[in-house]
Amino acid sequence: MKAKKVLAAGVLCALAIGLTACGGGSAVPGSPQDKKAKAGGTKTVMLYSSMQEDQLNAIKQAFEKKYPDIKMDYYFAGTGKVITKIATEAKSGQVAADVIWVGDPADYIGFKKLGILEKYESPEAKNIEKVFIDPEGYYTGARMMNMGIAYNTTKVTKEEAPKNWNDLLDPKWKGQIVMTDPGTAGTTKYAVGALMASKDYGPEYFRKLKENGAELQSGTTATHNQIAAGAYKVGMCLDYVTENLKTKGSTIEFVYPEKDGISIYSPIALVKGAANMDNGKLLYDFILSKEGQDVLVANNLLSVRKDIKQKDVTIEEIAAHAMNIDLATLAANANKVLDDFDAIFKKK
């Protein structure tokens, strides 16, 4: 099977079809798992996720409001820690999660190879572009994010803020650049892998970035907080995390690169042999439903659905500047990318 051209192809499909305003929605009413939940059934569902906790809590509140007899628990950590937890539990015989939701879609290829995912075709999948859905049925994209450049608005004007990746190499930013360690964050790993694989960037780009004084933080939240606090002027950041801080009054702004933007779709998957499989399917369907996707859009994320009105930026605008990214290549080269990156940034 040909490797998917991940986001750019999906975005362009969305362009052809167009996006319409959404109305209310529900998570598969009348389905077997819906009926079981209303009749009693198990009372919990466990989600492992690297998503920001504000967004997780928003999903939790909306899900539990819809299904008051089911408690949604979650384990929240950076992608690196989530994957370590999954791998450790898989070796002992069973992953304790019912649903997995981490940032880098390439990681799900590894999950499939580990044999820890359950095939599932959600009734909501008909509203989602096929490029966001695993052809074998093991996972479905559930949110979209964009890696770009953030800057502190008290130290950098909109006019002088970097507009592209190469702008970060300008000597005027020397010692004022921060990014997340890709070994701890799946979204950064995805972005670094995409740039490393590009003939226009490659490892040489990161060598130059390091020479320009770029520093690492051990987590996505820390990276953004450092810019918001003015410890660094600019950095490689996520749109929705930047917007979360901006909404709370932080002096931070996001720039979508004019060229080679990096868009990431973050999948959800059911765990094979999950203890709460029916509730896992309920949560899976809810996240993909209009109701669930509206919660995400209200919390500064982009929806994967065709029938959702996005909050600020449009899919068309993102598609016009997005890189073509080969998911299979990213998955195959993930370890080498991290090794090459560490050789540049962590050599003694």
Image (cartoon, rainbow, N blue to C red):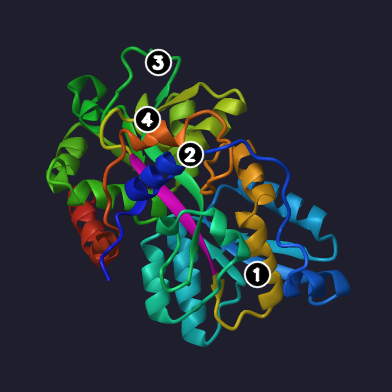
The quarter of the rendered structure image containing the N terminus is: bottom left
Q: Residue at position x 79%, y 66% from top?
A: 70
Residues tagged 4 and 2 counted as in contact (Cβ below 8 A): no
According to the image, label 1 marks what residue?
A: 281
In this picture, is 197 found above or below 12?
below
According to the image, label 3 marks what residue?
A: 155
Q: Secondary structure at mark 4?
A: loop
Residue type pointed to by label 3: Lys
Dot 2 crowding, Cα within 10 Å, few <14, some 14–19, many 20+: few
Is residue 264 located in the magenta-colored stretch of the structure? yes
Residue type pointed to by label 4: Tyr
In this picture, is 27 found above or below 257?
below
According to the image, label 4 marks what residue?
A: 256
Q: Residue at position x 36%, y 43% from top?
A: 12
Q: CA distance from mark 4 to mark 2?
A: 21 Å
Is residue 159 located in the magenta-colored stretch of the structure? no
Mark 4 / mark 2, whichever is N-terminal: 2
Residues tagged 2 and 1 counted as in contact (Cβ below 8 A): no
